[in-house]
Amino acid sequence: MKKDRTVMADADRCLMCFRPVCDLVCPADVRPAAVIQALHLDNESGAGLRLGDGTACLNCNDPKCEKACARGRIDHAIQIRDICRALSGQEKKQVNGKADLSVDFCGVRCENPFLLASSPVASSYEMCCRAFDQGWAGVAYKTISFYQTREVSPRFDCLPPRSSSSFQGFKNLEQLSPYTAEENFDILCRLKEKYPEKVIIASIMGQTTEEWTTLARMAEEAGADMVECNFSCPQMAKQGLGSDIGQSPELISLYTQTTRKGCGLPIIAKMTPNAGNMEPLAVAAVTSGADSVAAINTIKSITRIHPENYSSFPDIEGKSAVGGYSGRAVKPIALRFIRDLAVYPPLAGVSLCGIGGITTWRDAMDFLLLGCDTVQVCTSVMEYGYRIIDHLKEGLSIYMQEKGYNRVEEFRGKALPHIVLPEQLNRNRRLVCEIDRQSCIGCGRCYLSCQDGGHQAIRWDGHRPQVEETKCVGCGLCTLVCPTEAIGLKEVHDIG
């Protein structure tokens, strides 16, 4: 089984091609790209449904799909046939119908919890139309303001992992919508007329109290369902905007009140993570009229330094600036803030919208289990396109059916009681590592990590690692570095 999972993990190297050649050459019309891409997005059950019984792959002696694989032009092709064979050998999960993914968000019905975040992925009429057609429940439209920005070029950078084509972290210097406020509200009006069942959120940012009020009024007149106050953009070219507001409870309170003065719509306060504690800031918004809190916006960052001209990235004529960091790398930080908000008594009952690093349905589920009603997605759409919504919805739907949940609200917040204070953890429990000899390949990664970063509990016995249980403290470092998942932890006894 571990061997099969190692084979299937090769799907992580998939380039997620727009028009996959592997589909075109398959003589059995299996559409292997749909299978591989589902695995790439952590939708294993969905991959199994797309594959069917796998008979064609089991009987295939000439994997034309692998010969055509675009990844092979970079290093070596994805092991498509072996992946499909391994997947076909697993027990298929029975799925009957679909779970009800609809949620109530501040009194507004969303057909599913998945919204596009206010960003480049929701910045024009045509883009939002395509997103809606593909199944997204709504959009937080790119921030509308009377302040006209001028963007830099280039404006993006990323930190790619070493073993894949995907990036783990993404930096941007982009600011607000390039269109005028009047043009943007006309777009929202047309979107609502064409897609009345979709949720339209007008993200706004004013420079004065009067502007916040006016923008809120214009949003309501355009037919928006909600208003999102952008208290969090970290890369504004003018001081006193974005995250400068979001770090001041006084400004948050003032601008939330003036936004409420302009409309009767539900108000979302989009918070910045560039503060130590978000709870007092969120309370300032809620007590001043906000109905929901969205977290997090991007984190102030510098990704890399150019070794020749000493600028950072993106490089603009030898200079760069601090920008917003997003993508998979920020998800753990976002989850921490969401949990803090969810358990803070003054915020009890306040609707939460999770943002930060959501690529797969499992990522989204983490936010829902910590109390979010909805989630917003940006960076993964910039990387893979709107099409990921199929796997987000399918993966979550299958999970719900397997667990017996009929509605999202039935499992929302279930993880909260399990996140406790450090002093509430059992510190008398003792685990030790255990090595599966059949799976161990003798690479020695566990030995090196334990020797130089652990407790010297693994010794090298000729060609294989050996565990000295009397020294092992069960820290788990070895289980994290093992490339074949050959190491586990077993409970020895309770020392308390």
Image: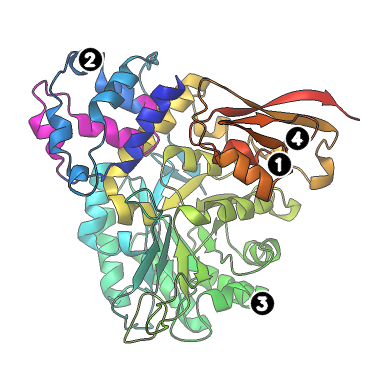
Label number found at residue 250: 3
The span from disc 4 to disc 3 (Cα, nearest Å) is: 51 Å
Q: Nearer the viewer, mark 3 or mark 1?
A: 1
Percent across and percent down for residue 462 are: 59, 31
Amino acid under disc 3:
Glu
Q: Give the range drawn in magenta.
A: 19-45
* Residue linked to disc 1: 419
Q: Residue furthest front?
A: 462
Amino acid under disc 2:
Leu
Percent across and percent down for residue 274 are: 59, 69
Circles 3 and 1: CB distance less than 8 Å? no
User: Is disc 1 placed on a helix, strand or loop?
Assistant: loop
* Residue linked to disc 4: 472
Left or right, residue 311 beside residue 32: right
* Residue linked to disc 2: 58
Which of the two discs, 4 and 3, labels the residue nearer the N terminus?
A: 3
| Residue positioned 55% across, 58% down in the render | 295
Which of the two discs, 4 and 2, labels the residue nearer the N terminus?
A: 2
Q: How crowded is mark 2: few (under 14 residues within 10 Å), some or many (20 or more)?
A: some
